[in-house]
Each structure stands twice: as structure tokens, then as C-alpha cells.
Amino acid sequence: MYRLGQKVYIVGDKFEQNLPIGEYGYIIAYDRNADNAFDYVVRIPKLGKHVYVPASDIELEEVLLKKEADRIEREALIDFALATRNEELFRRIMNGDKEEDDEKSKEVQSTEDFIKQVNLRAWI
């Protein structure tokens, strides 16, 4: 939950309100009505008005900068792996850490663990 007065960026327009995606705004109120789909009231200085937005349509600047830094880091690692012809690094970057998951899934489960897992999935 964001604080009042916090600077946020518009990252989506779920309800097609013609929101200026990529622009910033400030949270000026929470919408606590349980029957309403909107979570916040945001003041957008570029438009000069208040808009109701769901939480999925806004994001903090710090989070957006972190995502962009991660994307740039990943691209740089891919470029490095291609330049040095490091196939192992390239596969690990492209596949994520799935190789470690594959090794874990290849381990043999005991019968009791298997039955517990089946019962848990059946219960869900």
C-alpha cells in the first residue's frame, strides 16, 4: 500500500480511462469502498485533475528504476557471453536458474512424500 503524497508513475490503463502512461502523479487519497474497483485517487499534474486508479495501474519510481537496471544488466551479460563465446553463461542467463530446478526434480521422492504431495493437490 502506497503512502499519501507518494510519487507514482502510471504504468497501465486497465479501465481505459485515457490515462497518460509514463507520466507521474501523487497519491492524494485511498478509496476504501469495498464495492469499488479503484484503490487510489491520484493527482496528475500534467492533466491538472484527479483520477481514480487501481493499484495495478501505478508503480513507484524506485521499482521501475530497479526493473530497468535489471534489464540492462541482463542484456550486458548476454552481450558479454556472446562476445566471449561462453555458452554456459549464455544458457544460464537465457534459461534462468532452471538447471538447478531440473536437478532437484530428478531426485527420487519417498513414497510418503509423494502421497502427501498428491493429497495436498487433491485438497486444493
Image (spheres, rainbow, N blue to C red):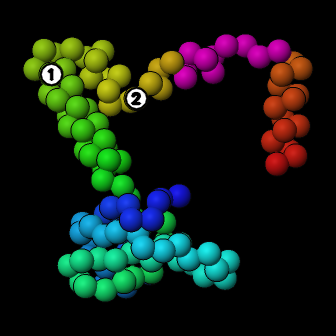
Give the spatial CA distance, label 2 vs label 1.
Answer: 16 Å
Residue at horizontal 61%, vertical 17%? 104
103 magenta-colored: yes
The answer to whether residue 10 is seen in the rendering is: no
Q: Amino acid at mark 2?
A: Gly
Q: Residue 47 has which mark?
A: none
Quadrant of residue 59 within the rendered picture:
bottom left
Relative depth, front residue between 17 and 80: 17
> What stretch of residues is rendered in magenta?
101-110
Q: Secondary structure at mark 2?
A: loop
Q: Secondary structure at mark 1?
A: helix
- Residue neighbourhood size for the residue with mark 1, other residues' Cα within 10 Å, grouped as few (<14), some (14–19), many (≥20): some
Residue at horizontal 47%, vertical 26%? 98
Name the residue beneath numbered marker 2: 96
Q: Position of residue 46 (x, y in %)?
A: 20, 79
Name the residue beneath numbered marker 1: 80
Residue at horizontal 55%, vertical 21%? 102
User: Left or right: 45 with respect to 106?
Assistant: left
Question: Taken as a whole, is the magenta stretch helix, strand or loop?
Answer: helix
- Residue neighbourhood size for the residue with mark 2, other residues' Cα within 10 Å, grouped as few (<14), some (14–19), many (≥20): few
Total residue callouts: 2
Q: Are marks 2 and 1 in contact (CB under 8 Å)?
A: no
Q: Is residue 18 above or below residue 101?
A: below
User: Left or right: 71 with respect to 12?
Assistant: left
Q: Is residue 48 above or below residue 90?
A: below
Residue at horizontal 39%, vertical 65%? 5
